[in-house]
Image (tube, rainbow, N blue to C red):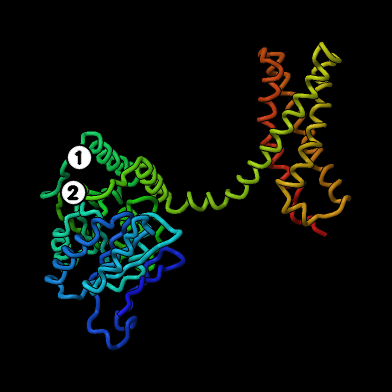
Amino acid sequence: MSYSLVPVPLGSLQINELISSRDILGASSPQAITFSLVIPTYNESKNLEKLVEVLSELLNSYWDGSYELIVVDDDSPDLTWQVGLALMPKYPQLRVMRRQGEKGLSTAVIRGWQAAQGEILGVIDGDLQHPPETLINMLDKMQKGADLAVASRHVEGGGVSDWGFIRRVLSRGAQMLGLIILPNVIGRVSDPMSGYFMVRREAIANCLMNPSGYKILIEVLGRGNIGTVAEVGYVFQERQEGESKVTWRQYIDYIVHLLRLRSRGRITKLREKWRVPIKRFIKFGLVGFSGVFVDMAILYLLSDASTLGWGLTRSKIIGSEVAILNNFLWNDLWTFRDFSSQQSGWRKRIKRFVKFNLICLLGIGLNLIILNILYNYFGVNKYLANLIAIAIVTIWNFWFNLKLSWRVTQTK
């Protein structure tokens, strides 16, 4: 008998409503799945066999086979997924998913839940730092009607084994920060950083998830329809095999996640709204930066006493006009290429240049005012004053040229 990998679900990170195992596996399926436990892994080949053995023994005695263990491996270099496949003949409730291209603990958990068949969905680390025995206490809470059961280090019976002072401070500090940013979510549990919990499928079904980093519990609390919450104490164990994956990036992801949930999607919408304009503005700024060198070079050649020694204002006007021509050519070919390609022909290009020039000439007027005020009234070096004036006027030039010089409507 051959054993195959579970296909990786595609598309949005959304848990579907329950489809019975009989519908999935056929009418001959012997029994429905009640509990699906996801084990996200990365380089856990040394821990996996022992973890699966202990979990299977516990759950067989509790539910007599009406459960499944789903290993979701992020294509580990140590081939954890292959170890999982080799264990499947011995453990019939074990399923293995190998993800390639998509990585991250939180998304791994959700992908596992999307492939799961259980009414209750759970997650446990694959490094044996979460004591498997605590599952039974959590399952008892779920059987009594809880929507969410969390294994907590901060209630009676909980704790950490050998954490140092700094790690304890960081953990508590992250929790306090969460209470400030998102009190109605973080305040519902004593250990919001826990990665060891289970949730009723119907409480998160059809909720679009958007997790960041490793803290999937915050996403479940923030986006799910969670009623009753129960907590069970556990002692966080030190890793027995492999290397710790705790990094500073996790704390940054945690803060970003809190802010995203706090904004209720507004940050994501703003980012999507402004992504293209910001990208275009960066190009516009780079082109403008090339124009700075042109502008500065002309200003130096015309106004410096060792050359022509012209006045500052006249030299600035000529330097700016040459820079405008430079900037227009680059913007037309690069920054606004998607617009200019719809407005082909020299006549339309000349028309765009005239509008670009007029807008920039108005900018030059503003530039001259700033330059003369900084140079004549505040004694700022003329080149530094010129640089400051250019920076201020850049936003002006970009916005009005986007709206007027390269309008999409000019396509006839």
Q: Residues within 10 Å of mark 2 (few under 14, many from 20)?
A: many
The answer to whether residue 61 of the structure is visible from this angle is yes
Residue 375's quadrant in the figure? top right
- The amino acid sitting under disc 2 is Phe
Q: Residue furthest right?
A: 347
The answer to whether residue 119 of the structure is visible from this angle is no
Residue at 44% in and 58% down: 102
Q: Secondary structure at mark 2?
A: strand
Q: Position of residue 63 (x, y in %)?
A: 15, 73
Looking at the figure, which quarter contains the N terminus? bottom left
- The amino acid sitting under disc 1 is Trp
Q: Secondary structure at mark 1?
A: loop
Residue 410's quadrant in the figure? bottom right
Residue at 29% in and 49% down: 186
The residue identified by callout 2 is 236
Relative to 366, does residue 301 appear above or below in the rendering?
Answer: above
Alpha-carbon distance for marks 1 and 2?
9 Å
Q: Position of residue 374 (x, y in %)?
A: 68, 18
Residue at 80% in and 14% down: 304
The residue identified by callout 1 is 163
Q: Nearer the viewer, residue 153 or 218?
A: 153
Q: Position of residue 231 (x, y in %)?
A: 18, 55
Q: Is residue 313 left or right of residue 226?
A: right
Determine contact: label 1, label 2, CB under 8 Å. yes
Looking at the figure, which quarter contains the C terminus? bottom right
Q: Residues within 10 Å of mark 1 (few under 14, many from 20)?
A: few
Q: Is residue 258 left or right of residue 411?
A: left
Q: Is residue 180 left or right of residue 399?
A: left
Q: Which mark is residue 83?
A: none
Residue 55's quadrant in the figure? bottom left
Q: Is residue 181 left or right of residue 347?
A: left
Residue at 22% in and 38% down: 168
